[in-house]
Amino acid sequence: MFWRVSIGIAAAQLSYRRRQTIVSTLGVALGVGFFVATSALMSGSEQDMVRRLLDNAPHITIKDEFRAAAPQPVFMAFPEGAVTLSSTKPREYLRGIKNHGAKVEELSQQPGVIAEAALMGQAIVRYASKDASAGIAGIDPEKERFLTTIEDNMREGSLMRLKTSSQGMVIGRGMATRLGLGMDDLATVVSPTGLVRRMKVVGIFRTGNLLLDEGQAYMLIKDAQVLLDKPFIANRIRIKIADPDIAEDIAAQLEARWGYRTESWQEVNRDFLGLFVIRNVITYSIVGAIMAVASFGIFNIISTIVMEKRRDIAILMSMGFRAADIQWIFLVQGVFVGLIGMVLGWGIGLVLLQMLGSVEINVPGLMDTQRLPLAIGFFQFGIGGLFAVSSAVAAAWFPARKAAQVRPVDIIRGAT
């Protein structure tokens, strides 16, 4: 019975100041709606960017280099000695990963793992008196289509034509446009050692990544070995695993075992991934400020009711209502505003998501037309609703506590 009476009193007091109640409720609803839409947009864009990173590059890359320079033998023999060396000449070693074939075979036998030996280098692509610097990637087309999305991004030709064409290469749309190259045209490729080869364009891709589209050329690893004068050498082992989240741990294990510098996709993109944290902090701080402003509205309306209803509070307490009961009545008002604002906010959030989902973005020369990436899930609605109710209750707590401290004797005496 008490609960019904308390809820009825709370509802009556809120309806008495209808305009202020509506404004406060809309403030909460807008905060929830913007939180839902912004959170879905931020999460969607983050997932989309990570997906692009994972699709366009291997999860783990083993390089023909070492993370730290090899120590001089004298320092290894006398680690605690007071020894100084000057003008030392570092030891030179043959570049390339030793036994790369056996390592690739061992990795490929593990479930869910795709491994490929590759040779990376630089060259100049020349056509019609125009030059373009290009990163050369000597690959195995059969495995490359599983390691990256180059095959899916082909606009003309095919990555698999590298296996059937003599001295073929696949280039990006940006490079093709810059040099005026088309399918089956012969371009001159000049290596850093001065070796010149004529190579046929057997495929043109477009990823939307300017660096790849204008500066990357793919060819068979044996053709790259001849061009770069590195016979039977591979300077990269590129690996894709079933669970990208554990790439960092696996990379550390491979580096500890074989000694070569092994980089996971998280390590390569650590600075870039760190921007997501900063962006989310800024975004949620702004949305939190909106909710804080809405909370002040709730605080204002309940404080006003407490000031106006001091005599009614005294009468209720003289009728047997305890201080905790009075406090509960005003807390219920905050809960009412929070719950109604939460439901309305969910509706506003759904409308905003529909509007954002219909927006098309087209950046000429950079990417194809696409829609804004959205990640819609229970998380956004649950956290937004919890934030709304908790902020409403927190805003109602202080005036409710003040109402519970009213002394009915003083109020009644003052009124008489």
Image: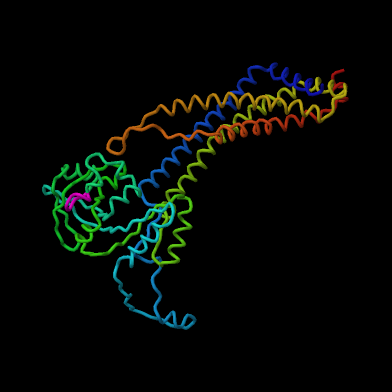
Quadrant of the image occupied by residue 306: top right
219, above or below 157, in the image: below
Residue drawn 75% across the image and 24% down it: 307
Q: Is residue 313 above or below residue 134?
A: above
User: In the picture shown, does residue 320 fall above or below 181?
Assistant: above
As drawn, is 384 to the left or to the right of 236? right
Image location (x, y in percent) of residue 71: 40, 75
Image quarter where the N terminus lies is top right
Residue 183 spot, x, y in % from top left: 17, 42
Residue 203 position by quadrant? top left
- Considering depth in this image, is 279 or 138 the residue closer to the camera? 138
Q: Is residue 20 magenta?
A: no
In which quadrant of the rendered image does the C terminus lie? top right
Q: In the image, which residues are magenta? A: 162-169
Residue 165 magenta-highlighted = yes
Q: Position of residue 96 (x, y in %)?
A: 30, 65
**Which residue is located at x 77 percent, y 31 percent?**
402
